[in-house]
Image (spheres, rainbow, N blue to C red):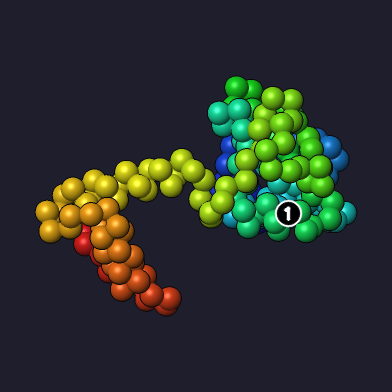
Amino acid sequence: MKTKWRLKRISKEESKAYHWLISRGYKHENIEIHARSSPDFTCSDGKGFEVKKVTNNQIVFHKQQFLLLKQMKNVTILVYDQTEEENINPSHIVLMDNVENNLKIEGIKVYVSKGCYSVRFELESLKIIEVYRRSLPKIPTFSEAVNQLIKHYKKNYVKGKKYEGRR
C-alpha cells in the first residue's frame, strides 16, 4: 500500500521506470522509491536506478547529485525520451560509472550544472529579479535588487521559522 501512495508523487518518467523494473522481475516490495533524492530507486539486490528525461537533446545532473551518484556502486541511469509516451522501456540504459560531463550518448549530451539548479531555472530567476528591480524605482542597480532579495530571504526563511509572506 505504501508503494501505491508513493507512486502518485513521482514523475511520469519515474513511473515508467518503476513499471520497467517490475517487468524486469523486481517485486514492488523489493523496490524502494526515492523520488526526491538520488538514486530514484534502490532495489533489494543493492542496485540503484536514476531516471533522467531528455530535454533539448541533453540530460541534466545537478553537481551534488552527479558527485553523489559517482560515489555509489551499482547505479544505472535510465534515460527516457519525451517523444515515447506509452513505452515503459528506457531509450538508453547507462552505468553511472560510464557517465561523464559533456559525454554524448547516441546524440544526447550529459550536462552537469555548476549550481544546484539547472541553467534554465537560473535564467528565469535572473529575469524575475530584473522585473523586480524595474518595479521599484528606489533600486537603481541589478546587484542592489539581488542584495535586497537575499536580505528578504534571510529575514523570512530562517531555519525553523515559517514564512508569513503576503497573502
Q: In which quarter of the image is the N terminus?
A: bottom right
Q: In this view, does 24 lie to the left or right of 2?
A: right
Q: Name the residue under label 1.
A: 69
- List the single residue furthest toward the bottom: 160
What number of labels is visible?
1
Q: At which x and y percent is residue 120?
A: 46, 40
Q: Which of 87 and 58 is in front in this view?
A: 58
**x 53%, y 55%: residue:** 116
- List the single residue furthest toward the top: 83
**x 38%, y 43%: residue:** 124
- List the single residue furthest toward the left: 137
Residue 13 visible in image: no
Q: At which x and y percent is residue 28?
A: 76, 48
Q: At which x and y percent is residue 118?
A: 51, 45
Tag 1 secondary structure: helix
**Rendered position, 83 above or below 112:** above
Q: Nearer the viewer, residue 40 or 106?
A: 106
